[in-house]
Image (cartoon, grey):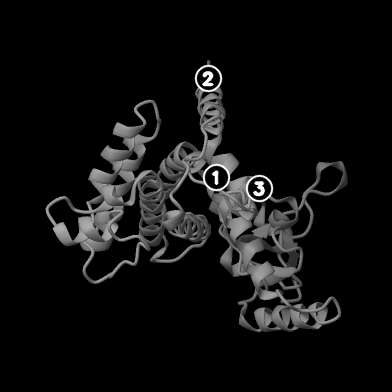
Amino acid sequence: MSAGEAAAEKRDAGRQLQPIPSEDRSVQWVWTLRMLAYHDATQAFKRYGERDAHSHREVAIAAGSASEYLHTAVIIAVDPMLLADPRHPQSLLMLSRHNRDLAVRHADLRSIAMTRKIALVHEMFPDLPGREAATKLAARRNAAVHAGILDTEDPAQLLQWLITVGDALEPLIANPSAIIFWPDQYEGTIQSLRDDAATAAEKLREARLEAARDSFRILTLGLSAEAIPPFVAALEGAGRSRRTEPADDRTCPACRNLGWVSCERATTFPTVQGGDVGDLAIVGVPIRFNCGVCGLELDTDELLEFNNLRTVMTLDEEPDWSLLSPDDYPDWDSGTDIDLDV
């Protein structure tokens, strides 16, 4: 059995679990925790697909928080008092049946640590997978929050741990509205993270595309069909004003609006019919793609995966022969290409 088949089997087993029946007083709390986990999981996938100095740290924090919310929801569903620090009588009373309405004084509540939550959930459900993933995720989150320390591992690993935890715990949490836990706008990202055969570059590229699509969706939320085209045109125009030449308009693979490729100049001898070498030409080789509408950014290696982005553009520029060295072209007879009018 492959690793992918094993993971699918575990997910199927998890779906057979029945949600824990909660007391009436704790139903809303459990539902709130599930929605908080969904929110932070969505944020983790979004930040993974974005490229900036803080995205790795924020992925660790959001993924770790989503995991903790799920563990807490399972504990509250079983018995809220299990969440209380056993060394703190006021918290035990606050979460016990003595407090019939479960009115919680947040400043006075002392709860168990995340490591204890993980242990408690797996003591209650010994066959539940994901304990190791949850433990590793909690350690990375704590390091990021309390010390600003980041591990050198690929952020995709953090999300794979989160998926393992979510697949295991989410079926135990009541879902009266039948809302799917994993955000559907990142379905491709989640599937690539589950796919053992997918490379790190493929996982990241899929995440970037879906994060950009989600940004475009949020940007146009509430706009009428008539209002979207001029809004998009304004964003496209603003993007063009920021680009550095040489550059060329290209269709964005995420939102299908116009972005641009930034190019670097290169000199080439194009081959003409018969195999002879044609005139010297200056071309623009794409090295980066940007979309001013959805915010997608792709570097050289990433844009090579898209046919419309990697196409070289011909620049209407006169070549500077002085920049060429015969050493770069050993078969070139420089005397045959001298422009006698210069």
Q: Nearer the viewer, mark 1 or mark 2?
A: 2
Q: Nearer the viewer, mark 1 or mark 3?
A: 1
Q: Nearer the viewer, mark 2 or mark 3?
A: 2
Disc 2 marks a residue whose amino acid type is: Ser
Instruction: Give the CA distance from mark 1 to mark 3.
Output: 13 Å
Disc 3 marks a residue whose amino acid type is: Glu
Residue named by callout 2: 2
Residue at point 76% right, 68% down?
257
Q: Nearer the viewer, residue 134 or 87?
A: 87
Place of residue 309 in the rendered image (x, y in percent of width and height, measured from the top left): 70, 57
Determine whether, in the image, residue 316 is placed left or right of residue 90.
right
Instruction: Report the number of discs.
Output: 3
Which structural element holds mark 2?
loop
Query: Which tag, 2 or 3, sits closer to the chain's start?
Result: 2
Q: Nearer the viewer, residue 226 or 254?
A: 226
Place of residue 219 in the rendered image (x, y in percent of width and height, measured from the top left): 66, 75
Which structural element holds mark 3?
loop
Q: Quadrant where the C terminus lies?
A: bottom right
